[in-house]
Image (cartoon, rainbow, N blue to C red):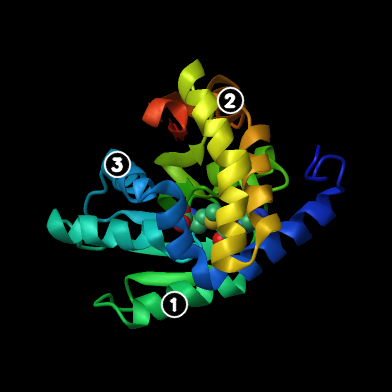
């Protein structure tokens, strides 16, 4: 490809992903707002709404980065008055992203006994089998080297009855919107990345990785192949992103 990410060895991809998030960690939250026109907040709110946590939910948020999903989860259970015995573990491979998240927690009203930050790899989770009753991954699985391994690990650490929920960029189902989306992704996003953070390549990588991610149906099949049941997906914003859901039964 013109971005040079095809044919890179697996470990090379992992190294590059690490560097991308090292480079963008401090500006990550601001850039999300700017590039998605704030839409990522709405998508993440819908995502937690679909999860619909209840009291006693032990959530593992993988590739949790700066904690966006985790804090939404905690806010949700508090406003739904079902925070009893709820806990969230944020796992991410990148210490720079995690330290932004930890700082957010320290300056928030959330106590460290309801949220934990762990450094680790989605493809080899540092947890025992059947440990959590919910697993989320938002805008993270696309960055992993081996998606099947991520799904197998998700299945392994979930308790029977546990829910897998993934929010990820997907494939637009409307030709006109696709044209505008292409212009925006290939021309504006890397330029904005350069102007705001000085990181042209990091944002080129973002666009390219979205293009190469399996479409909604293909990803649904991969989730089923990992053993999940009742697998469904829902498109948001005409498929710019999709929420995939499955259960370990
Ligand atoms: N979930 C957060 C959100 O929605 O704002 C962060 C998403 S960010 C686009 C992707 C995250 O995936 C980064 O923090 C990166 O470090 C993490 N990541 C990439 N590969 C990973 C892996 N193999 N295991 C765990 N985290 C990984």
The Cα atoms of the two marked residues, 3 and 1, are separated by 24 Å
- Which labelled disc corresponds to residue 46? 3
Of badges 1 and 2, the one in the foreground is 2
Viewer-closest of 47 and 231 = 47
Quarter of the image for the C terminus: give it.
Answer: top left
Give whichever of discs 3 and 1 has the lower sequence position. Answer: 3
Q: Position of residue 64 (x, y in %)?
A: 49, 59
Q: Nearer the viewer, residue 10 or 192?
A: 192
**Disc assigned to residue 205:** none
Q: CA distance from mark 1 to mark 2?
A: 33 Å
* Callouts 1 and 2 close, C-beta under 8 Å: no
Count of marks overlaid on the render: 3
Give the secondary structure at mark 2.
Answer: loop
The correct choice, above or below, for 178 with respect to 126 in the image is above
Quadrant of res 93:
bottom right
Q: Quadrant of residue 151?
A: top right
The picture places residue 129, in percent across and down from the top left corner, at 55, 51
Is residue 178 found left or right of 146 in the rendered image? left
Instruction: Estimate the spatial distance between the alpha carbons at disc 3 and disc 2, rounded to whole Å.
Output: 20 Å
The dot on residue 215 is 2
Mark number for residue 102?
1
Q: Residue at x 42, y 80 (%)?
A: 103
- Residue 21 in the image: state x and y as whole percent: 62, 64
Where, quadrant-wise, is the N terminus in this rendering? Answer: top right
Disc 1 crowd, CA 10 A, few/some/many (<14, 14-19, 20+): many
Q: Nearer the viewer, residue 93 or 180?
A: 180
138 up-or-down from 229: above or below:
below
Q: Residue at x 80, y 40 (%)?
A: 2
Of pointers 1 and 2, the one earlier in the residue sequence: 1
């Amino acid at each position: 490809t013109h971005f040079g990410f095809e044919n890179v060895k697996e470990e090379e991809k992992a190294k590059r992903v690490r560097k991308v998030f090292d480079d963008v960690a401090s500006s990550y939250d601001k850039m999300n707002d700017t590039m998605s026109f704030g839409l990522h907040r709405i998508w993440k709110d819908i995502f937690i709404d679909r999860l619909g946590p209840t009291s006693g939910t032990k959530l593992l948020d993988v590739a949790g980065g700066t904690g966006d999903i985790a804090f939404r989860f905690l806010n949700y259970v508090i406003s739904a008055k079902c925070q009893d015995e709820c806990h969230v573990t944020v796992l991410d491979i990148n210490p720079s992203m995690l330290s932004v998240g930890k700082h957010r927690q320290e300056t928030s009203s959330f106590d460290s006994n309801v949220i934990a930050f762990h450094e680790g790899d989605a493809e080899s989770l540092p947890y025992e089998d059947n440990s959590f009753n919910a697993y989320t991954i938002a805008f993270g699985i696309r960055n992993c080297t081996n998606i099947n391994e991520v799904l197998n690990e998700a299945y392994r650490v979930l308790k029977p009855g546990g829910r897998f929920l993934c929010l990820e960029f997907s494939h637009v189902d409307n030709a006109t919107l696709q044209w505008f989306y292409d212009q925006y992704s290939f021309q504006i996003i890397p330029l904005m990345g350069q102007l705001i953070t000085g990181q042209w390549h990091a944002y080129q990588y973002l666009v390219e990785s979205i293009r190469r991610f399996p479409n909604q149906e293909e990803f649904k099949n991969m989730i089923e192949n990992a053993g999940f049941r009742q697998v469904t997906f829902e498109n948001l914003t005409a498929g710019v992103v999709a929420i995939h859901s499955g259960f370990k039964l």
